């Protein structure tokens, strides 16, 4: 006869259920760890949110998340540009009342004409990703050659939206916008928003593709499809309000 002190008490149903649940959870954790190792080993870097954002990588599942983080971090913004081969020249902050600028740079040698306009680092980052991942691929596909120059109407102007006497300040008042008027290819072919946006051929397709291709990088992308005030340019900004038209 087994002494009372050594008799095993049957486990309660609740205890058995808890042990079973714990075993399932441990199995799930093990599977998750193995899956994480496999993903880290074989998934492309652009699909992994913990890898650095790089301008020279294809756009992947995690690119948008990493881009947003870099755009919000002045130091990281500059690191991504530098590792992508984009030289920046620091621009001092400008104290101009409600048209003050902060976190601004210039981009020499980045196709822009007039050259090296002042813009915020997030705007410069968006411009770099747009030209690399949208403008040049669309130019090769539709025009058969790369873009050598991008004509623009400026980035900084202390004014209200649409130049009105009253109302909210334009993103141009903070050097946080770029108005693109035309693109010139390596052979000298000029494709302008004013003359070619409605074209049914290659020039029009190119312009509409670069407009659509700007939307992942800029918050507001306004074209002739938006209103008559944008009939001759693409407005691209990193402001508070989102639009893609």
Image: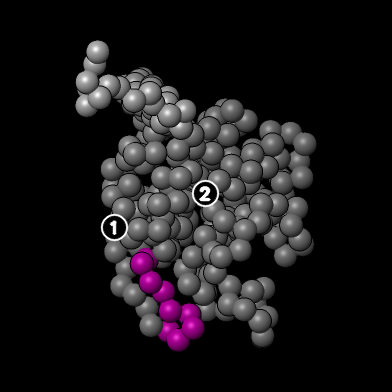
Q: Does the segment drawn in magenta span residue 98?
A: yes
Could you tell me which quadrant the N terminus lies in?
Answer: top left
Q: Secondary structure at mark 2?
A: loop
Q: Does the segment drawn in magenta span residue 245?
A: no
The answer to whether residue 183 is left or right of residue 196 is left
Q: Bounds of the magenta span?
A: 96-104
Query: Could you say where residue 146 lies in the image, as x and y percent from the top left?
Result: 50, 34
Give neighbour class at mark 2: few <14, some 14-19, many 20+ (Cα, 10 Å).
many
Q: Which mark is residue 217?
A: 2
Question: Who's the residue at 55% across and 29% down the image?
Answer: 140
Query: Could you say where residue 106 lies in the image, as x and y percent from the top left?
Result: 36, 61
Residue farthest to the front, as pictured: 1
Tag 1 residue: 75
The answer to whether residue 165 is left or right of residue 219 is right
Question: Who's the residue at 76% across and 41% down the image?
Answer: 199
On screen, 106 above or below 169?
A: above
Q: Secondary structure at mark 1?
A: helix
């Amino acid at each position: 006869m087994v002494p009372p002190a050594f008799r095993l008490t049957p486990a309660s149903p609740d205890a058995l259920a808890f042990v079973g649940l714990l075993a399932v959870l441990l199995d799930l954790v093990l599977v998750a760890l193995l899956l994480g190792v496999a993903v880290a080993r074989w998934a492309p870097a652009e699909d992994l949110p913990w890898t650095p954002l790089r301008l020279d990588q294809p756009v992947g599942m995690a690119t948008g998340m990493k881009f947003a983080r870099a755009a919000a971090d002045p130091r990281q913004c500059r690191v991504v540009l530098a590792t992508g081969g984009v030289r920046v020249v620091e621009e001092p902050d400008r104290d101009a009342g409600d048209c003050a600028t902060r976190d601004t740079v210039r981009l020499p040698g980045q196709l822009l004409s007039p050259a090296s306009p002042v813009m915020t680092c997030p705007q410069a980052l968006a411009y770099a990703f747009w030209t690399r991942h949208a403008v040049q691929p669309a130019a090769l596909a539709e025009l058969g050659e790369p873009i050598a120059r991008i004509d623009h109407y400026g980035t900084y102007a202390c004014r209200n939206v649409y130049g009105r006497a009253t109302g909210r300040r334009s993103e141009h008042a903070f050097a946080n916008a770029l108005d693109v008027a035309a693109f010139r290819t390596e052979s000298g072919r000029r494709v302008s928003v004013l003359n070619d946006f409605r074209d049914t051929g290659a020039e029009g397709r190119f312009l509409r593709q670069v407009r659509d291709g700007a939307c992942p990088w800029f918050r507001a992308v306004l074209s002739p499809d938006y209103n008559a005030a944008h009939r001759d340019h693409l407005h691209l900004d990193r402001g508070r309000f989102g639009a893609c038209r």
